[in-house]
Amino acid sequence: MDKIIIAIDGHSSCGKSTLAKGLASSLNYTYIDSGAMYRAVTLFFLRQEVKLEDEEQIRQALQHINIRFNAENRTILNGEDVENEIRKMEVSNFVSQVSAVPAVRRAMVRQQQAMGKDKGIVMDGRDIGTVVFPDAELKIFLTADPEKRAQRRFEELLGKGIKASIEEVRQNLSLRDHIDSTREDSPLRQAADATVIDNTHLNREEQLEYALELAHSAGAVSL
Ligand code: DC
């Protein structure tokens, strides 16, 4: 086996995308940010004022949503580059509610599974090892100390020029953790066969090195 599927799950702002991007670039794999897909749906719902209680409106809306990633891994919603928009607090504050809607999950999971059909993919999210790719050759569950996560997300937003206070970021993370872990449809949980990495005290390089060892042991061959 040379190409495998790598599933990375964990709470918000644990550094999943940093690790996933690092692995994808080292192995020459495709990186898919499944959270960006839920964020793009959320942006569409906000713009179109879709009511979460209205199943028919949701069904219709989902038919008009096309999400893809361009060569620079930026999120494209119906032809528009929405990468910056989907990272804003307005979207962050609503995305957990939107991604708890079963019809939304069904639509996204179907697309995610299609993206992985040829393997050679690293996907990060909340239900990748449990629901999207239960047979993934490598499953990683990332965790980190909550305060460290809030600091990292705050600095990331600052770096992108997005305004938010550290307290706002803390509250958003803790609320999303709660909703993501307690929703009925595919809640965030650790797959029984996932390897846990706590990166509170690991730097990027250490984390990547360890994950690459796991990937090679799981059968990945750098292309
Ligand atoms: O990874 P992120 O923080 O950008 O994800 C945004 C939200 O999307 C997160 O709060 C929960 C939801 N999500 C999900 O329900 N399932 C996934 N596979 C990925 C994200």
Image (tube, helix red, strand yellow):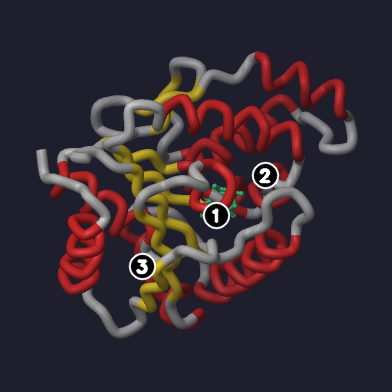
Q: Is residue 76 visible?
A: no
* Residue 148 sits in quarter: bottom left
Quadrant housing the C terminus: top left
Q: Residues within 10 Å of mark 3 (few under 14, many from 20)?
A: some
Decide if ligand 1 comes within 8 Å of the CB at mark 2: yes
Quadrant housing the N terminus: top left
Q: Position of residue 128 (x, y in %)?
A: 50, 48
Q: Element at badge 2?
A: helix
Q: Residues within 10 Å of mark 2 (few under 14, many from 20)?
A: many
Q: Position of residue 141 (x, y in %)?
A: 44, 65
Question: Along the polypeptide, which appears first: circle 3 or circle 1?
Answer: 1
Label 2 belongs to which residue? 99
Q: Is residue 130 above or below residue 173?
A: above
Q: Position of residue 24 (x, y in %)?
A: 23, 45
Q: Is residue 159 above or below residue 117?
A: below
Amino acid type, mark 1: Arg
Whether tag 2 and tag 1 are in contact, CB under 8 A, the answer is: yes
Q: Residue at x 41, y 51 (%)?
A: 7
Whether tag 3 and tag 1 are in contact, CB under 8 A, the answer is: no
Decide if ligand 1 comes within 8 Å of the CB at mark 1: yes
